[in-house]
Amino acid sequence: MGKNMIKVDEKGFYGKFGGAYVPEMLYPNVEELRLNYEKITDSEDFKKEFDHLLRDYVGRPTPLYLAERLSQKYGVKIYLKREDLCHTGAHKVNNTIGQIILAKKLGKKRIIAETGAGQHGVATATVCALMGMDCVVYMGALDMERQKPNVERMRILGAEVVPANSGSKTLKDATNEAMRQWINNPVDTHYIIGSVVGPHPYPEMVARFQSIISKEIKIQLKEKENKENPDIVIACVGGGSNAAGAFYHYYNSPEVRLVAVEAAGLGVTSGKSAATTALGSPGVLHGSKTLLMQTEDGQVVEPHSISAGLDYPGIGPVHAHLFDSGRGEFYAVEDEDAMKAGIELSRLEGIIPAIESAHALAVLNQLEYKDTDVIVINLSGRGDKDLDTYIKWGGY
Amino acid sequence: MNRIDQLFENKKENILSIYFTAGFPSLEDTLPIMQAIEEAGGDIIEVGMPYSDPVADGPTIQESNKKALENGMNMKKLFSQLGDMRETVSLPVVLMGYLNPIIQYGVEEFCRKCKEVGVDGLILPDLPIQEYQDEYKETFDKYDLRNTFLISPQTSEQRIRTIDEQSDGFIYMVSSHGVTGAKSGISEEQEAYFERVKAMNLKNPRLIGFGISDHKTFSTASSYCNGAIIGSAFIKVLQDADDLSTSVKNYIQGVKQG
Ligand SMILES: Cc1ncc(COP(=O)(O)O)c(C=O)c1O
């Protein structure tokens, strides 16, 4: 398979991207994780608890639903992988369940996390409540405004929510703050990163926890279509965790098209965008070498997307590699088109999607496909948290 | 001879290294601040290259980075400001910052420029040791740039040995768990860590940084190694200064003499 082989190497690289670019103060923490995560997550003990919680607490397997009216509209068979039906309303909880069990086994007492849309923060606060661990979530001050219900959900669950006031006051800044707080509390604290970003081993570890998505798709598609492989898998990419989960077991099946959808914001060339592969170049942010939106001078550019969960100037290193190697197809969807796709799904299927997920749906208007294709769209989350944004947008 | 080597050859204790962010408080303050540090009796000047996402820094240095970028500081500008520094500044000069702007500038070109203007060393907290060995060391050596790594109370003895092996300027001992920022005093736990590293008899000189702010903390830290580094506390002095050169001199003399 050569160039198209998607696999992390020993140093934590996917092709040219990845690694662990962290200050020495974080080295022991990251090294502790690197040395232990495979051993722990491969143990029978861990697997038993992880499987049990995913089934009885999260509600897995999530359905693979044939969206008939949507299929009719686009003239192609479309399945939705219903991550929106996970407990807490998005795929994020698959990862937080995995990491909280890991943190416990590492003897950690306290959890910190960053959050953008608040979904990862809620998923983290949830598992901390479940395990009786202290939880502090860093969230950009702007995101706290536009995702108010999630802020209150975290607080109800007993988490402390701390505003990040630097930079654009969004996900990037929340991540900076969480990393600083991990430096300040290196011994008793585990940092639950919410996407396939950060220093090695986070990107691979988070992808493995999320890989349950494509594992289930394979089984479910076999039942429904008598084949494990769809022709196309589509997912939105902020940092890229739901996409990594949906692609994972298809990485090395070149006959399956992997379609990653980024947020174009007000337009890729508008200066208000989060379309990293279109606008980015290789650089180092949050501990890994990846594609990054930056100035000529290497300063990170403030992104924009109507969807807080996609409002990030980088992508996980595995996605940078999918892009660079040509294994993945990358598209960008503008705010307006995502909102329309969200309304469309609501009207056709009675499902109000998260605005992040609506980006994945909207790509159907750009994508070329055959009418005999079977498409799986990863519906990463539900739209409850986005009601304010839907209402403000108003086009329904 | 590299000025860092020269300094450590001639001076073994109470070395005072001062960090500030280039282009702060005003864009053109960089060189005047360096001159003031030299006149006031500092030993090493660490010039911070501002970055949008300084994850190892606390609020004070974050703010100075942000302000410097807003003022229009960038790498080109910095090298032009440093272009004739050697006419007035004789102290060792170290550039400190994050990796990404250097990658974009081009590592080789960056090092060439450093040599050309008279920079002596680099501190890049997010440059991994392995990557330094594989991809940077040769270039740094070619342009006679000393590279400084950090260690923290969490760093294992074995890793400290590796870092000592790989370092050639001085070792930057981060004083506590934490990002940059002035804390009050030095605890017994910290002193135990200083003692532990002192007893390792490393080949490189050591400077202690993070949380050093006044004569007392400077003297305590210096008693365990070759000297100390002041950053956030100095940035605060710059922030509050009416007259930069007077404030810098008063502050540095205060740190040295109490
Ligand atoms: C519903 C939903 N989908 C997608 C994302 C984007 O994250 P990722 O790209 O890691 O899946 C988020 C992030 O908050 C989200 O809440």
Image (cartoon, grey):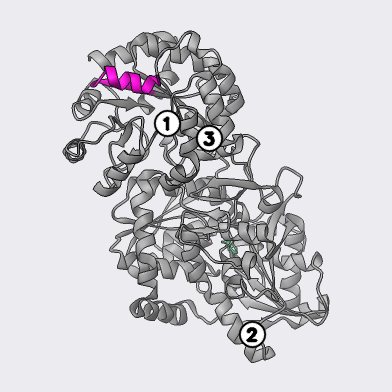
Dot 2 and dot 3 residues touching (CB under 8 Å): no
CA gap between label 2 and label 3 equals: 47 Å
Mark 2 or mark 3, whichever is nearer to me = 2
Q: Secondary structure at mark 1?
A: helix
Instruction: Say whether mark 1 and mark 3 are on the same chain.
Output: yes
Residue that badge 2 annotates: A228
Q: Which amino acid lies under the numbered mark 2 shown in the image of this protein? A: Glu
Whichever of callouts 3 and 1 sits on the residue coming sooner in the sequence is: 3
Q: Is A371 on the left-hand or right-hand side of A320?
A: right
Residue density around tag 1, few if under 14, some if 14–19, many if 20 or more, within 10 Å: some
Dot 3 and dot 1 residues touching (CB under 8 Å): no
Mark 3 or mark 1, whichever is nearer to me = 3
Magenta residues span B1-18
Q: Residue at x 52, y 56 (%)?
A: A197
Q: Quadrant of the C terminus of chain B?
A: top left
Closer-to-camera residue (B10/A31): B10
Dot 2 and dot 1 residues touching (CB under 8 Å): no
Q: Which amino acid lies under the numbered mark 3 shown in the image of this protein? A: Tyr
The mark total stands at 3
Quarter-of-image position of residue B68? top right
Whether residue A267 is visible to the viewer of this picture, yes or no, is: yes
Q: Quadrant holding ligand 1? A: bottom right
Q: Is A284 on the left-hand or right-hand side of B255?
A: right
Instruction: Say whether mark 3 and mark 2 are on the same chain.
Output: no
x, y (%) of residue A126?
43, 67
| Mark drawn on residue B60 | 1
Residue that badge 3 annotates: B51
x, y (%) of residue A260?
68, 64
Q: Secondary structure at mark 3?
A: loop
x, y (%) of residue B207?
29, 29
Q: Chain of mark 1?
A: B
- Relative to residue A83, is residue B6 depicted above or below? above
